[in-house]
Image: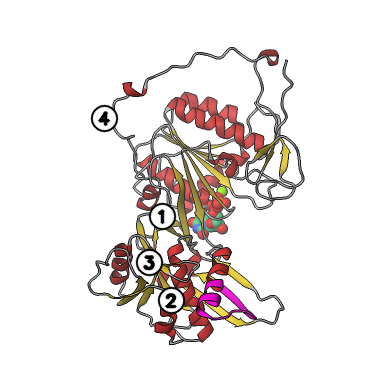
Amino acid sequence: MAKPVTTFSCSACGATSTKWSGRCDACGAWNTVSEDVPLSTGPSGKTLGAARGSRIALTDLSSKEAPPPRTASGMPELDRVLGGGLVPASAVLVGGDPGIGKSTLLLQAAAAFANGGLKTFYISGEEASAQIRMRADRLGLAQSPVRLGADTALRNILTTLDEERPDLVVIDSIQTMWSDTVDSAPGSVSQVRAAAHELTTFAKRRGAAVILVGHVTKDGQIAGPRVVEHMVDTVLYFEGERGHQFRILRAVKNRFGPADEIGVFEMTGSGLSQVSNPSALFLSERGKPSPGSVVFAGIEGTRPVLVEIQALVAPSPHSQPRRSTVGWDGGRLAMILAVLESRCGIPFAGLDVYLNVAGGMKISEPAADLAVAAALLSAREDSALPADTVVFGEISLSGALRPVGQTENRLKEAEKLGFSSAIAPEGGKPGGAKGLKLTRMGDLTSFVGEIFGA
Ligand code: TYD
Ligand code: MG
């Protein structure tokens, strides 16, 4: 008989390997690799004869098959991120830092779906039923027909669910679930994987939608949501800065809808409230025009979002100047500084550079390059850009400005919010916002010349 192969996996990124090491080869985290415990095999360890599965020819499937029926929660910010609503027999993962508001969001979502007629279970492995009820009271949801459970033993949970035939099950959180098919502690890679597997199988078998909550862990002591990402149909991340009240629900994978869609919420004393016009909210904190502040006209999923980018440039007391970013990629900042230095002759050596996207928003669009460059220059020159101007465009290594998608949507949103001019790259489709003065530029040098007279 072949010797069973021992495998090891990383609790931070879920990568597997055949040997143990102190540092994960895939993500570089230390002390996160541990041995996998295999799922229990059949009687006396023999491989069971494979059961014959059903086969169906692709041509037998009707192309007129109706799209999956979806149930909307009635919370538009959540439904948009789900691609229109929940699909039956699907599994959704909602990941996020501890304390960001996942339990709050999902209790509100569970109540919304239950009020809409879905038979909904909210099962918590972290809080007792009384605690969940207190939270529901605080959220004003005490009267909604959600059934609560406080349990961590997956076998009990699945037995109940098999009898009850729910339409929707929320599991808060996957790291607290314990499956007796695996002989290791809750929260370990093997447990999280086994529990997620059993719950997704339940979803497919019973046609229920299952939402799994996963804590993002920094220290790797318990397995993070990455371990589960490939098993589920939809992956959503709930993000935001602790000090800010804005929260963003972002779809990073969706088998039933567009990825990269966002929903915006605000954490209040009585739970999360939906923000239907995020640009107005993100810009509401903006004061007078000041050096280093630039408004970027961005696109998140299908929706335009205007955000303020703030930069601070100051002489550095250190031999190695600081480069610090919040809400934007540090590598991309280094690239823009290098382009400004070598293509436009504007040095940042000896200067500390801080870059911040206001409101706790995270931007990954290269279209923000030009707004970042403008904020850096404005901070360095101590000269404010006109307050009624939005900026967008991608910067290439040669210093050329590249057109970006959805120019029209960006301009229309800016016009709607009262901006009167925009700076964008040449090329691309002409804008459709008539009330906006549009200045188009081909490269970064002409931008610097035009705006800062350098
Ligand atoms: P929670 O949903 O428990 O976070 P998670 O499940 O992601 O760990 O949210 C915890 C935070 O939210 C906590 O700091 C308190 C705050 N909060 C409010 O501000 N308002 C509310 O109505 C609720 C329920 C929580
Ligand atoms: Mg929680």
The amino acid type, in three-letter code, at marker 1 is: Gly
First of labels 3, 1 by sequence position: 1
Foreground label between 4 and 2: 4
Cα distance, mark 2 to mark 1? 22 Å
Write down the residue under mark 3. Answer: 279
Above or below — where is 126 with respect to 401? above
Q: 10 Å neighbourhood of mark 2: few (<14), some, or many (≥20)?
A: some
Q: Is residue 127 among what the camera can see?
A: no
For disc 2, the marked residue is 286
Q: Which residue is labeled 1 in the image?
A: 263
Q: Earlier in the sequence, mark 2 or mark 1?
A: 1
Nearer to us: label 1 or label 4: 4
Crowdedness of circle 1 by 10 Å Cα count: few (<14), some, many (20+)?
many
Q: Residues within 10 Å of mark 4 (few under 14, many from 20)?
A: few
Mark 1 / mark 4, whichever is N-terminal: 4
- Give how far across and how far down residue 399 sits, in percent: 47, 71
In the picture of the structure, the residue carrying the numbered disc 4 is: 64
CB-based contact (under 8 Å), mark 2 and mark 1: no
The span from disc 4 to disc 2 (Cα, nearest Å) is: 51 Å
Q: Please state the extent of the stretch shown in magenta in the rendering.
A: 338-354
What SS does tag 4 mark? loop
Q: Earlier in the sequence, mark 4 or mark 2?
A: 4
In the displayed image of the protein, which residue is found farthest to the left? 434
Residue 1: image quadrant is top right
Residue type for callout 4: Lys
Residue at x 34% of width, y 34% of height: 68
Q: Please tell me which of labels 3 and 4 falls first in the chain.
A: 4
Q: Residues within 10 Å of mark 3 (few under 14, many from 20)?
A: some
Asked whether mark 1 and ligand 1 are closer than 8 Å, the reply comes as: no
What is the x, y in percent for residue 45?
69, 16
As helix, strand or loop, the secondary structure at mark 3 comes to helix
